[in-house]
Image (cartoon, rainbow, N blue to C red):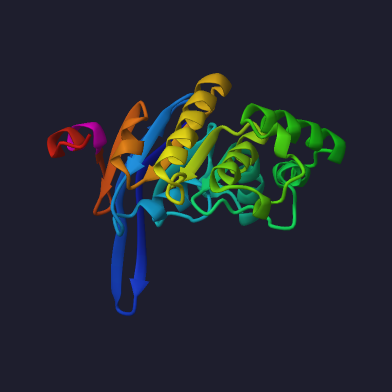
Amino acid sequence: MLELADIRKSYRLGPVEVEVLKGIDLRVDAGDLMSIMGPSGSGKSTLMNILGLLGRPTSGSYRLGGRDVSTMSDRELSAFRNEHIGFVFQSFNLLGHLTALENVALPLTYRGMGRRQAGRRAEEILEKVAMGDRLDHRPDQLSGGQKQRVAIARALAGTPSVVLADEPTGALDSNTADEVMQLLIRLNRDEGVAVVIITHDPVVSLLCRRQSLIRDGMLLDGSAEMAESGAP
């Protein structure tokens, strides 16, 4: 469903070329729930951008839904991203002047869905994340956990192939973070959508069925690494 092969990414800083990703191989199948854990500077943000079609690798191949995305134009990538990838961010990235319902419906209208149909789909998915009683609330009227539920609903509304969650619990207290993780786990199971979580938190990582660790631009077996380190 999603497959990276020998993905490399380099940046030029003056006369020096810095290699950030050093031959990443990764496969994510439909229905997977996996984490990619790594410290600051490990390359996980760069990997997230490539997975989300927000950046291009220097070399290597990336296939998503059977398509080689490396051959796509920027316009094609934008449309393909909107159709196949849902995003959940640490800072929620909700539009402050829109209600919860409007925030979830907006990406659907970008895909050409009629406003009424988009509204019905947005209401349906907000009900699934227990936000059906907050449809008309703007972000400044919601708690952090509620904002993240809206963000998750927005990510799922278009029935994407994969949801990429970048530190989805990073701005939340521990109790709310656990509620959000349990919601992602339940939606992964019930909706059958693949979820990839980028995190620095071993507790979050171990809630996923698959774990990988990114270190110095290389992807390792996270379950073995965390077992050796004695992570909880």
Out of 63 and 55, give the one closest to the viewer: 55
Does the stretch in magenta take in 222?
yes
Residue 228: x and y in percent read 13, 35
Write the residue at 29% across / 48% down: 38
Lateral position of residue 184 relative to residue 159, left or right: left
Out of 160 and 130, give the one closest to the viewer: 130
Considering only vertical position in the picture, is 121 above or below 106?
above
Lateral position of residue 139 relative to residue 57, left or right: right
Considering only vertical position in the picture, is 82 above or below 21?
above
Considering only vertical position in the picture, is 49 above or below 146?
below
Instruction: Write down the region rendered in magenta.
Output: 221-225
Q: In which quarter of the image is residue 86?
A: top right
Write the residue at 48% across / 24% down: 31
For the stretch drawn in magenta, what is the main secondary structure?
Answer: helix
Write the residue at 30% across / 69% down: 17
Out of 189 and 75, give the one closest to the viewer: 189
Residue 166: x and y in percent read 46, 47
In this view, the residue farthest toward the bottom is 14
Residue 89: x and y in percent read 52, 49
Write the residue at 50% across / 31% down: 184
Residue 227: x and y in percent read 17, 32
